[in-house]
Image: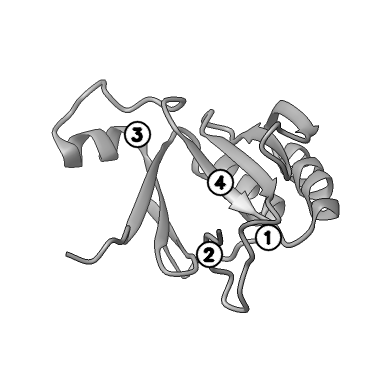
Amino acid sequence: MQQQISLITLGIADFARSKRFYGEGFGWTPVFETPGIVFYQMNGLMLGLWPVPELEADMQRPGLVRPGAFALAHNVAAQADVQPLLDRLVAAGGRLLRAADAPPHGGFRGYVADPDDHAWEIAWNPAWPIDAEGHVRFST
């Protein structure tokens, strides 16, 4: 079976607040939007934002949706790109979780939480080049 993820859906509390974070912070434009859900076309998958009650109802898991048990990552092409993106995300309603620094394994990274407390790592990793389509490739 092919290894892939087609869609990541994040449960959100406030549509306008989340759209500001992803639109102004990351600079992303929705490819589809209704009053109840928004989708962003990523490089090979979709990211969806859906109000928590509707997501819980769809999964038939009331009271279960909560952020924080995972982290999403957005890699950038250069170390110098990490801090400006963290700054933009905080200005767009995010909360800085970890200031940008160099981890022991190399590279440079920081963490920010979106308005619903989903953690995003903003990272530059010289061992993970980004191709023209924005795909990260693991290189050994």
Q: Residue at x 26, y 23 (%)?
A: 64
The kind of secondary structure element at disc 1 is loop
Left or right relative to 58: residue 127: right
Residue sitting at 71 percent across and 56 percent down? 126
- Residue 35 visible in the picture: no
The residue to which callout 1 is attached is 27
Label 4 and label 1: CA atoms lie apart by 16 Å
Q: Return the residue nearer the eye: 138 or 72.
A: 138
Relative to the observer, which residue lies in front, 94 or 77?
77
x and y percentages locating residue 5 in the rendered image: 32, 58
To which residue does mark 3 refer? Answer: 52
Tags 4 and 1 touching, CB below 8 Å: no
For discs 2 and 4, the disc positioned in front in the rendered view: 2
**Between 17 and 40, the one nearer to me in the picture:** 40
**Which residue ends up furthest to the bottom in the rendered image?**
132
**Residue linked to disc 2:** 137
How crowded pointer 3 is (Cα within 10 Å; few <14, some 14-19, many 20+) is rated as many
Q: Which residue is mark 4?
A: 73
- The CA distance from mark 1 to mark 2 is 23 Å
The answer to whether 70 is drawn above or below residue 72 in the figure is above
How busy is the neighbourhood of tag 4: few (under 14 within 10 Å), some, or many (20 plus)?
few
Local secondary structure at mark 2: loop
